[in-house]
Image (cartoon, helix red, strand yellow):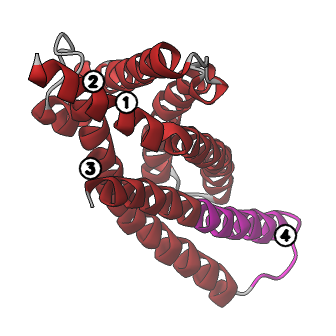
Amino acid sequence: MKNIDKITSVNITITFILTLLFVNFGILYFYIEQINLYSSMETGAQVLESDITAVEKYITALSLIYVVGFLFTGMFFVYWLTNAYLRIKTIFPNLVGTNFQILIAWFIPIIGLYKPYEIMDDLYTHAKQLLVKHLNVKNSLLNKGILHFWWFLWIFDNILILLASKFDKKAIDVEEIMFSTKFHIVEIIFSIILCLVTAKMLFNYSRVESEVNSIVDIEYDQNFTK
């Protein structure tokens, strides 16, 4: 029952991430529409204010959906990561990550820049060790290249989000609004790539998770009976 629960948590997380991906495509579409409208205004073409307002409303609505979806995605991601990490920790007690750290590390300045990555790196490293030890297989699904790329995208996209919010506050005239919108488009593109990479990273681990869990159970039983 526990294994089913954990597999489900991974699948739910991936589903939410893919939902965020499609929402991002929707936001991207309306930002492009916004650029087109303001570009038409600059060339002297007649643009209805109702059209601009409608596009802004769509962007606001989709952005709200994205925020809510992001919160749910984060909840399931942390739930999955906590279970997966603490399960591995029963075999490798030297791992320093705790339930509390996994939960709050994302939100603490400075620490949030490296601690979540360290926890994911520990999970990948030790899961791969177990697979090599028991199955004699160097599983390419746990290649840490995707992990490095994921964390780079996560940090960079968060920086872009902060900058985009500052540009929004300063945007008053058409030129400033267009610059802010173009910056949002860049951020959305990185967010789309981040969604794809994160989903792929979790999918890779989910394909070996049942084997890793079985190995952990075997080693734990062996250690407990000694």
Residue 79 circle label? 3
Q: Secondary structure at mark 2?
A: helix
Lower position in the chain sequence, tag 4 or tag 1 = 4
Q: Is residue 13 above or below residue 125?
A: below
C-alpha separation, residue under disc 2 versus residue under disc 1: 6 Å
Q: Mark 3: which secondary structure? A: helix
The quadrant in which the C terminus is found is top left
Amino acid type of the residue that numbered disc 2 sits on in the rendered structure: Glu
Q: Secondary structure at mark 1?
A: helix
Tell me if label 2 and label 3 are in contact, CB under 8 Å. Answer: no
The quadrant where residue 26 appears: bottom right
In magenta stretch: residue 201:
no
Q: Which residue, given by chain and number where applicable, does mark 4 sit on?
A: 40
Residue 23 colored in magenta in the image:
yes
* Residue lying furthest top: 94
> Residues in magenta?
21-47
